[in-house]
Image (tube, rainbow, N blue to C red):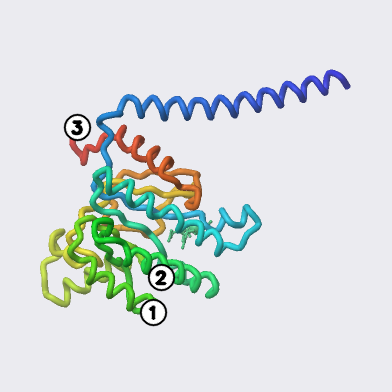
Amino acid sequence: MIKKIIMIIIIIIVCFLYKIKNTLTSYLSFYFNKYLLKDKLKYPKHVAFIMDGNGRWATEKNMNRTHGHLMGSVNLLSIIYCCFLNGSDYLTFYAFSEENWKRPKKETDYIFEIIYKKLKFMSKLKEDMSFKIMIQGRRDRIPNKLLKLINLIEKNTQPNNKTIIIALDYSGRSEILHACKQLLKNNLEPTINNFTNYLYVANVPDPDLIIRTSGEKRMSDFLTWQHSYSELYFTDVKWPDFTVQELEKAIINYNTRQRRYGDIK
Ligand code: IPE
Ligand code: IPE
Ligand code: MG
């Protein structure tokens, strides 16, 4: 009996130490990289986010999934300003996919309501804190009230330099088909240049870094054409817990990548 108890205690201590060891190593490597890259830390020109895990975040806390979507909208502005102040010029946020229509109406209505409120708030930002806002996706199924606001915001924020793109009712495959149809309609050669001119948003450089939260390691039809040379970063942290500190970890990790584009250097 005593032997068994001692064994159990040893197992608990080993588990405890192992967890601490993991945490310690991850912290040490984070600060080590941060120190090494201190003056050279470069924010990518275009960062795209697959904001995943809102539902699970809420369910884990015995809350309704909709609460996860609400909490997922809280850190948005701090992430936006952190990227823009550090040199990024374009940010894309995957807010709603074409496949997300499969969800209960109550949830989709709630998501569009949050997007409406967030955009309304952003439309009131002072000029020097404002940015250009664009929508990437189908427009024919967006609730009328939201669509009106989007049209107004896209027009009013046009002169700003830093750009926010919201992928809404978006599917990468549909975007590719849309561009193909436009090429056929206009009788144009299917070249890369002609093709990219007919994506939902034109004249935006491909994303350098795509961050997906919540532990899933897939693209879920996001920027299917544009992500061919993007660096991918996956984190287990769910979107409502994705703070500026978590963003910094992703940027540090991005700075350790070597982008070769097929070359050998
Ligand atoms: C992402 O969070 C937000 C949207 C897809 C609109 P989810 O709602 O997919 O959260 P999980 O993946 O179910 O936890
Ligand atoms: C991708 O998340 C879409 C958004 C983040 C808006 P999903 O939760 O819909 O993706 P899957 O279903 O896990 O692939
Ligand atoms: Mg999800």
Tell us which disc is closer to us: 3 or 1.
1
Label 3 to label 2, Cα distance in Å?
Answer: 47 Å
> How far across and down, in percent of the image, does residue 107 sit?
53, 70
Residue lying farthest front? 126
| Tag 1: amino acid | Lys
N-term-proximal mark, 3 vs 2:
2
Q: Which mark is residue 145?
A: 1
N-term-proximal mark, 3 vs 1:
1
> How far across and down, in percent of the image, does residue 123 sit?
32, 67
Q: Which mark is residue 264?
A: 3
> In which quadrant of the rendered image does the C terminus lie?
top left
Tell me the element at label 2: helix
Q: Nearer the viewer, residue 158 or 97?
A: 158
Q: Which residue is pictured at 36% across the width and 27% down the height?
A: 33
Q: Is residue 51 visible?
A: yes
* Mark 1–mark 2 CB contact (< 8 Å): yes
Residue labelled with disc 2: 116
| Tag 3: amino acid | Ile
